[in-house]
């Protein structure tokens, strides 16, 4: 038992490892609002009620509920590598009466979505966990419609943190154009546009 706990804790603090589903309760900590609240993320995303939105790596759904509620005539597509995380977010959204969501256990390198089917995609403290961020950005480019927007948010305390200039470099190499950005240092959101 002690070895299992030690392994889970190690994974939670190791760069390049997905955050363990066993510690999902920590990702729903209300103190996260001090870093970035769901309300502030929604302001940055600037969603239309009819948008099709992809959340890559939702974990237990800290931001998912607010985003789904902002899409009364749209749809929220949740993609996570870990089925256990998807089940947690599914339960949370179902309890809240959210029906305009779909759930996909998949790798960021091969998204199970049709080309150009997404209006807005967002990731919060996820891109650094992906083994090949460039391939993930190419996939995000593929599934976004022309004129679609990608939002990458990085936060302090993340073992997989990538600086904004590195994200910008990777996004440009995938074909994106830089857009707006918010925050600074190790707590920022950057928007990229699919031409």
Image (cartoon, grey):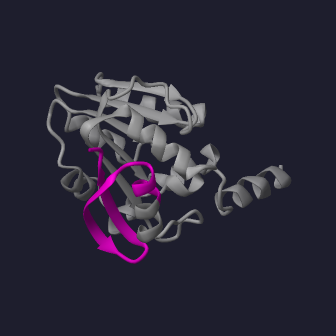
* Location of residue 99 (image quadrant): top left
Residue 38, position as x, y percentages in the image:
29, 53
Residue 119 horizontal side relative to residue 6, left or right? left
Magenta segment boundaries in residue numbering: 170-195
- Is residue 88 visible to the viewer in this orientation of the structure? no
Q: Is residue 35 shown above or below 82? A: below
Residue 57, position as x, y percentages in the image:
48, 43
Q: Residue at x 54, y 37 (%)?
A: 85
> Most extreme residue toward the bottom, as rendered?
185
Question: Nearest the camera: 38 or 189?
Answer: 189
Quadrant where the C terminus lies?
Answer: top left
Residue 20, position as x, y percentages in the image:
64, 48
Question: Nearest the camera: 96 or 62?
Answer: 62
Residue 134 horizontal side relative to residue 122, left or right? right
Look at the image and say whether residue 183 sits in the magenta stretch.
yes
Look at the image and say whether residue 140 sits in the magenta stretch.
no
Residue 126, position as x, y percentages in the image:
50, 52
Q: Residue at x 18, y 43 (%)?
A: 47
Q: Residue at x 35, y 41 (%)?
A: 64
Residue 139 horizontal side relative to residue 52, left or right? right
Q: Residue at x 38, y 32 (%)?
A: 143
Q: How many marks?
A: 0
* Location of residue 29 (image quadrant): bottom left
- Is residue 141 visible to the viewer in this orientation of the structure? yes
Question: Nearest the camera: 192 or 188?
Answer: 192
């Amino acid at each position: 038992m002690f070895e299992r706990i030690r392994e889970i804790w190690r994974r939670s603090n190791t760069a390049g490892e997905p955050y363990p589903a066993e510690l999902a309760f920590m990702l729903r900590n209300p103190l996260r609002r001090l870093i970035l609240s769901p309300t502030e993320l929604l302001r940055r995303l600037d969603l239309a009620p009819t948008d099709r939105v992809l959340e890559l790596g939702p974990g237990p759904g800290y931001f998912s509920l607010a985003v789904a509620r902002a899409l009364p005539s749209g749809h929220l597509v949740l993609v996570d590598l870990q089925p256990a995380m998807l089940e947690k977010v599914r339960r949370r959204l179902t309890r809240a009466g959210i029906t305009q969501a779909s759930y996909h256990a998949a790798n960021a390198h091969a998204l199970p979505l049709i080309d150009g089917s997404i209006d807005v995609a967002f990731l919060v403290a996820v891109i650094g966990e992906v083994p090949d961020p460039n391939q993930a950005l190419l996939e995000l480019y593929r599934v976004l419609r022309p004129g679609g927007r990608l939002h990458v948010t990085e936060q302090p305390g993340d073992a997989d943190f990538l600086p904004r200039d590195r994200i910008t470099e990777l996004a440009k190499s995938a074909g994106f154009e830089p857009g707006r950005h918010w925050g600074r240092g190790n707590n920022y959101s950057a928007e990229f546009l699919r031409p």
